[in-house]
Image (cartoon, rainbow, N blue to C red):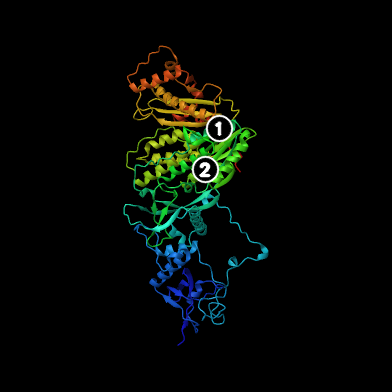
């Protein structure tokens, strides 16, 4: 009896000349070698009812068991990406918690580095005869025609080659592991595969590692690697690119006494520089160091496993450069960046190690984001500096700064104004917690007092609450001092939040979303002193009778430094609470004075601290005024302040409460007073400036 032709449908490619095929008539999925395909036909559910067709086969398809398939897959990977390992299998990971199957490993390597396709009409087996399709048309039952929407487009009509722009709320969740690239369910699968290829190419170009034999010495730790996938959006929330990065599991690294601390740019320093950019009409250009950490060389032997999807038996990576995830990597990159900038003639600012100054040039960076501010008279030197940096690192040129640390930067050089806004970040937070459809609110919190929760919150409720407060806290730390007091208040209930606290957190985030276009405005002609500082305290307003305190530092109208906090100790009078607040503000003033001196900015006036407590001011400025307190630490702060005031290093000035900008950092305000607080902060709505 002649063999019977079985009609099946391709499920997936497994390895060279091996396919996984589904046979609907028998309802089985089998691994087949030497199948013949008809790519002009497509599957239809109706076809499952057709019977197999008697037909003499040119060659009997060979069915493989799983062992044979596994061997073919291993050989395919070895010949495809590791020529020196031909004939060896792929090593299984030693991590029992690993999510990656052997099938995933093989498929990923084939798809990231595919083997070349054979030339048309050629087969490895010469006994094959050319067949027009999988089966002759006169014998095979007809299949449904290709649906109109799947037909190939008419070349004369033109084809849209660029995909539609994707906004943040339309993008699917980024894949969490390599195994997800092995499915056809993720919309951005091919993009992530391309990102994987780019990451591996980047590591190879920088000679990041060598593939070596696993060390025999058990004292040498071999760290696992982890793939991290993410989206990158622009300031308007549109998808820019997909990212894939290999990271070391630094959390498993053996703890040592080696110094690993790395300084990062303080947000307050960046805001100060933005204010100076406006005041002196400086050029502000932005560069990005590509794979910044890989520019740093390791100073000790470090071994890692090979990344999932690309293992080789008995092999591991010996790292030469600071791969992301190592505990020492940030410090090595900071040292590398500082060394290069100093080599190019810039001086490091002691108060912030990520700020460097030169003749008419000011450079500051946050990890791989580098901003270069320069005076017009130093434009040629700044351009030469950029060229010199390109000799050391691979840099991306972003032109004039417009997006930094999730901050939108808008500048009007003609009016000498600059705005900082986090509308895109706040929108993403509101979407994450489903708050975009809520009714608008115009104050961060109601004036009613929040009470401790008498019940016990579940771990899930605690985690969700902490996420909400953390998300809002980042915005209030960077550009939204108008909600700083609200977030400080909510942070007091992080360990046991109740329903009232969750509602309050949602309200605070809804307020940020309602007012997402509020921006800090810096202006040369703000009508205010170029630098001013205000301090305030709210006496005994907590249940444990500690006081709230806050200060704010403004430069050219806009806030650059602020704090809304709860004092650490209980005081016995309003004056004592004010003195502690003034002492904290005075110490920060001394720090700011040193920083400004190093960057070359000396205000033309005496910097004074505004205070609305006349008794506290009298104690600091008057002669022979007796201050009777039994609290030793308060008395020490009092005498230190008197010393600084009498020496002329700190000046204090009385300001009425209605004009006290720091008042909004010490208490929750009703709508009318809150609007006045926002006005005093010099924050404005810039929705008309955003397309």
Q: x%, y% of residue 81?
A: 47, 63
Residue 554, placed above or below residue 4: above
Q: Earlier in the sequence, mark 2 or mark 1?
A: 1
Query: Image quadrant of residue 385?
Result: top right
Res 90 seen here? yes
Q: Quadrant of residue 73?
A: bottom left
Between residue 458 and residue 110, name the one nearer to us: 110
State the SS at label 2: strand
Q: Secondary structure at mark 1?
A: helix
Question: Crowding near pointer 1: few (<14 within 10 Å), some, many (20+)?
Answer: many
Q: Which residue is mark 2?
A: 369
The quarter of the picture where the N terminus appears is bottom left
Q: Nearer the viewer, residue 151 or 443?
A: 151
Q: Quadrant of the C terminus?
A: top right
Q: Report, in whole angstroms, how far the alpha carbon at label 2 lies from the one at label 1.
A: 19 Å
Q: Position of residue 200 (x, y in %)?
A: 48, 56
Q: Residue farthest to the top?
A: 624
Residue 346 position within the rendered picture, expressed as x and y whole percent measured from the top left: 53, 36
Q: With respect to residue 277, does 20 lie above or below? A: below
**Res. 623 mark:** none
Q: Which residue is mark 1?
A: 275
Q: Which is closer to the viewer, label 2 or label 1? A: 2
Q: How many marks?
A: 2
| Furthest residue in direction right, as rendered | 156
Q: Is residue 443 visible?
A: no
Circles 2 and 1 in contact, beta carbons < 8 Å: no
- Tell me: residue 253, above or below residue 272: below
Q: Residue at x 46, y 71 (%)?
A: 19
Query: Residue 434 location in percent, x, y?
Result: 47, 47
């Amino acid at each position: 009896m002649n063999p019977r032709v079985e009609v099946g449908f391709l499920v997936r490619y497994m390895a060279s000349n091996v396919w996984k095929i589904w046979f609907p008539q028998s309802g089985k999925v089998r691994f087949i070698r030497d199948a013949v395909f008809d790519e002009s036909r497509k599957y239809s559910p109706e076809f499952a009812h057709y019977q197999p067709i008697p037909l003499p086969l040119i060659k009997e398809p060979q069915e493989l068991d799983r062992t044979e398939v596994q061997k073919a897959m291993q050989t395919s990977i070895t010949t495809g990406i590791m020529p020196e390992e031909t004939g060896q299998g792929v090593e299984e990971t030693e991590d029992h918690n690993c999510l990656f199957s052997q099938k995933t490993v093989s498929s990923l390597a084939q798809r990231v580095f595919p083997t070349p396709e054979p030339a048309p009409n050629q087969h490895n087996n010469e006994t094959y005869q050319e067949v027009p399709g999988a089966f002759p048309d006169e014998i095979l039952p007809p299949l449904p025609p290709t649906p109109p929407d799947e037909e190939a487009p008419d070349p004369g009509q033109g084809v849209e080659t660029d995909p539609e722009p994707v906004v943040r709320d339309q993008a699917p969740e980024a894949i969490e592991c390599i195994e997800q690239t092995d499915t056809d369910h993720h919309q951005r699968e091919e993009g992530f595969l391309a990102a994987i290829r780019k990451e591996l190419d980047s590591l190879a170009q920088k000679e990041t590692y060598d593939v070596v034999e696993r060390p025999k010495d058990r004292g040498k730790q071999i760290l696992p690697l982890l793939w991290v996938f993410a989206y990158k959006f622009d300031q308007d929330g549109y998808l820019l690119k997909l990212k894939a990065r290999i990271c070391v599991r630094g959390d498993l690294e053996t703890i040592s006494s080696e110094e690993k601390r790395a300084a990062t740019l303080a947000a307050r320093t960046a805001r100060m520089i933005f204010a100076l950019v406006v005041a002196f009409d400086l050029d502000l250009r932005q560069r990005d160091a590509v794979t910044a950490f890989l520019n740093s060389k390791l100073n000790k032997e470090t071994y890692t496993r090979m990344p999932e999807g690309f293992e080789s038996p008995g092999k591991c990576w010996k790292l030469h450069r600071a791969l992301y995830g190592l505990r020492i990597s940030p410090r090595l990159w900071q040292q590398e960046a500082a060394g290069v900038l100093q080599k190019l003639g810039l001086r490091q600012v002691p108060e912030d190690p990520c700020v460097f100054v030169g003749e008419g040039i000011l450079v500051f960076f946050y990890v791989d984001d580098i901003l270069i501010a320069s005076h017009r008279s130093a434009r040629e030197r700044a351009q030469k500096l950029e060229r010199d940096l390109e000799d050391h690192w691979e840099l991306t040129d972003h032109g004039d700064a417009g997006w930094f640390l999730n901050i939108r930067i808008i500048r009007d050089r003609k009016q000498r104004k600059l705005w900082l806004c986090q509308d895109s970040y706040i929108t993403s937070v509101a979407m994450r917690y489903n708050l975009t459809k809520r009714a608008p609110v115009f104050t961060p919190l109601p004036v009613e007092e929040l009470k401790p929760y008498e019940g016990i919150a579940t771990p899930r409720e605690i985690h969700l609450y902490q996420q909400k407060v953390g998300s809002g806290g980042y915005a209030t730390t960077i550009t939204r001092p108008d909600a700083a007091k609200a977030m400080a208040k909510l942070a007091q209930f992080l360990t046991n939040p109740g329903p009232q606290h969750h509602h309050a957190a949602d309200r605070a985030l809804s307020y940020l979303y309602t007012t997402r276009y509020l921006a800090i405005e810096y202006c040369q002609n703000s009508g205010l002193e170029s630098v001013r500082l205000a301090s305030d305290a709210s006496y005994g307003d907590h249940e444990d009778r500690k006081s709230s305190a806050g200060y704010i530092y403004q430069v050219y109208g806009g806030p650059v430094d602020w704090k809304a906090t709860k004092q650490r100790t209980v005081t016995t009078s309003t004056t004592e609470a004010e003195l502690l607040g003034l002492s904290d503000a005075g110490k920060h003033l001394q720090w700011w004075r040193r920083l400004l001196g190093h960057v070359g900015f000396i205000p033309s006036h005496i910097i004074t601290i505004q205070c609305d407590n006349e008794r506290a001011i009298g104690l600091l400025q008057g002669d022979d005024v007796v201050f009777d307190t039994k609290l030793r630490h308060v008395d020490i702060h009092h005498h230190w302040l008197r010393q600084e005031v009498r020496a002329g290093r700190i000046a204090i000035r009385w300001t009425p409460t209605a004009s006290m900008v720091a008042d909004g950092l010490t208490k929750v305000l009703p709508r009318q007073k809150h609007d006045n607080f926002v006005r005093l902060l010099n924050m404005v709505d810039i929705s008309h400036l955003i397309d």
